[in-house]
Amino acid sequence: MPEMDPEYLKSQMQEEKLPFEPRTLLVGLWLRLWILVVFWCVTIIVGFVAAKIMGTQTFAAETVLLYKPSALGAQIVGKEEQLPIDTLMHMVKVRTNLEEVRRRLGLEVRTSIIGYACDVEVQRDTTLMIIQCYWDNPRIVAALANSLRDVFMENIGKIHISTIDSLYEEALREKQVLKSKQAEIRVAVEVSKQNAEAEQEAESSTEDMQRMLTRMHRIRSAISDDKKHSEDLKRLAELELAYKNAKKLYELGAVAKEAVDKAAVILEKQKKITYDTEKIKNWKSQLEEITEAVAPSNQKKAKMIDGPSDAVEQRALDLQLEEVALDERIKYLEQLREETITGELAGEHGQKDFTVVSIAEVPSTPSHSTTKMLFVGICFVGFTVGIILVVLLVLLDTTLKSAPEVFLKLNHKTIGIVPKISGRQKLTPAEEGSNLLELFKIISRKVRSLIPQRGAKILIVSTKPGEGKTVVSTNLAACLGRQDERVLLVDANVRAQSSQKALGELLFSEQGPLKGLGEYLSYEADSVDEIIWPTALPGVECVPRVGKAVLSDMLGSNRMKEFLDECASRYGVVVIDSPPLQSYVDAELLAQWSDAIILVIQSHYCKGSQIKKILERLKTTKAPIAGVILNRVDKLYLELD
């Protein structure tokens, strides 16, 4: 099986890594927790204010009525004509009632809004009517429910009063009609009597005429029946003779048996026509009775003449009884009408049909409130946005902050982590009680284990100015000097930089005029000994940067190479403090003469993409990168190493 390309395997491993280091991400979230807390506090305040301003509270109040139609109402309109409870329920919110409620309460709203705010329902299988109202004011909602109830009951009373008036007027009209009917009946009685007398006078002549007509009808019928009977007898005799002849011929063998049978059948049919059956005799008897009824006797005819007169007199008696009942009703309605006019029953009819079971009380708590919902909604949205904001801040922060993140994004190990120290604390080993002394002792041992050769030229670089490269170089040189090694610290910042901290402050003040690397590269100093000076650090000598700046290209010259080679032959370690990589090419020129590179990265300062570009530039120098020193690391990130 062929071996895999190491570079391919390395790229595959990098592709499988997460785009962020989980532990560093969690620490970043924790460090930004104060942002989340501040955001949440502001959200709570905003939510509270918005809920108070924009939130609404709805109060509910209800009044209950029991519908029990009074006997008075039944007497007035009739029990079967009383309005059902469902119809009355729909009468509560009629426009006139809502207008009256608005006028009484002085509400500056449309009647449609009052209608929407009120609800009327009937309890199932009962006659309980419930009036429910909803409003944003507890006192108004109670007054609204009670006012709507009172207006409705008053209108029911007015309906009863108007019904009494209409019934009274209707009774008066009925009495007028009754009077006219009585007058017509009296006239009809007189006319009936006169007609009866005239009919009695014409009775005899009428009876003779009817008898004569009946007799003529009977004679005509008898003549017709006699003629028909004679014809039938003649036909019967002919058929009997034909039957006898057929029978004789059959006996002689002249005709077949079928001819005799056919003659017999025809003869029987004719007998049935000629002679009456029992049914025909019964029908003739009934016909005689009908004829008698057409011409009745004198006694029956007298009763028929007297009948109409008796019916008219009975109708006259019925009208008199009806008049008495109508007078009683008019009297009763007049009494009710007088009582209504005097105010004794004014507005009481509706209260008699309805009983107030409960009145609407002022509610102490709202039935529905959007304040809490709005507050919770704003807080939830604010909390969610705050969390998303903090997570985005952490994810968008692509600066390197911890050792695991350096390894994840740069694929380089961290050989040292320097914690964040306040500016007033001692940073250089020359000062007693330096906070970094013990830490750099550990780092220096790691450096020597990675770069063990004598005369090793170690280039200390950084991406941007101000990442602590000079402090790292100074402390590393000091700790290596304490380990019984001769160390040369070279300040290779040959450009004029007012903000760059020079290493000259480590020199003894009584040394007089100084010459540095710039003077050596510009041939103002002939030998290496002229630019090397002792320092306050034990075992450490220094090549400072003094005087004016020189051309930076000289760092890549053979004179610079010869200088470093000579220094490597004299000293155990040569520590070179180079300019930052992002701004200048100086570090790349120095890297080609160096044995190893140590990259100083300030935590939470440079983006990973920027550092990757710097590393790509250093690859062209073929100087190996020994490791990374992470500087000014927050305390929480230290625990991730």
Image (spheres, rainbow, N blue to C red):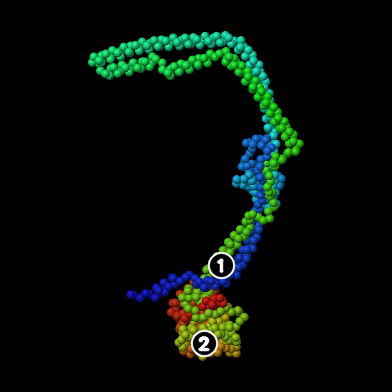
> Closest to the observer: 483 or 586?
483
Residue 70 visible? The answer is yes
Rendered location of residue 520, percent (x, y): 51, 85
Rendered location of residue 275, percent (x, y): 39, 15
Residue at the (55%, 89%) spot, across then down: 538
Rendered location of residue 383, percent (x, y): 58, 64
Disc ID at residue 126: none
Residue 557 visible? The answer is no
> Closest to the observer: 499 or 573?
573
First along the sequence among labels 1 and 2: 1
Residue at the (41%, 72%) spot, across then down: 12
> Closest to the observer: 443 or 250?
250
Type of the residue with mark 2: Leu
Q: Secondary structure at mark 1?
A: helix
Is 443 situated above or below 272? below
Residue at the (64%, 18%) spot, across then down: 188
For label 1, count other residues whose C-alpha is less than 10 Å away and answer few (under 14), some (14-19) or many (20+). Answer: many
Task: Give the CA distance from mark 1 to mark 2.
Answer: 43 Å
| Disc 1 and disc 2 in contact, CB within 8 angstroms | no
Q: Residue 245, located in which quarter of the rendered image?
A: top left
Report the side of 434 relative to 261 (left or right). right
Type of the residue with mark 1: Val
Residue farthest to the right? 342
Q: Secondary structure at mark 2?
A: helix
Disc ID at residue 390: 1
Residue at the (57%, 88%) spot, across then down: 536
Disc ID at residue 480: 2
Q: Residue 512, located in which quarter of the rendered image?
A: bottom right
Report the side of 485 relative to 369 (left or right). left
Rendered location of residue 388, percent (x, y): 55, 65
For label 2, count other residues whose C-alpha is less than 10 Å away and answer few (under 14), some (14-19) or many (20+). Answer: many
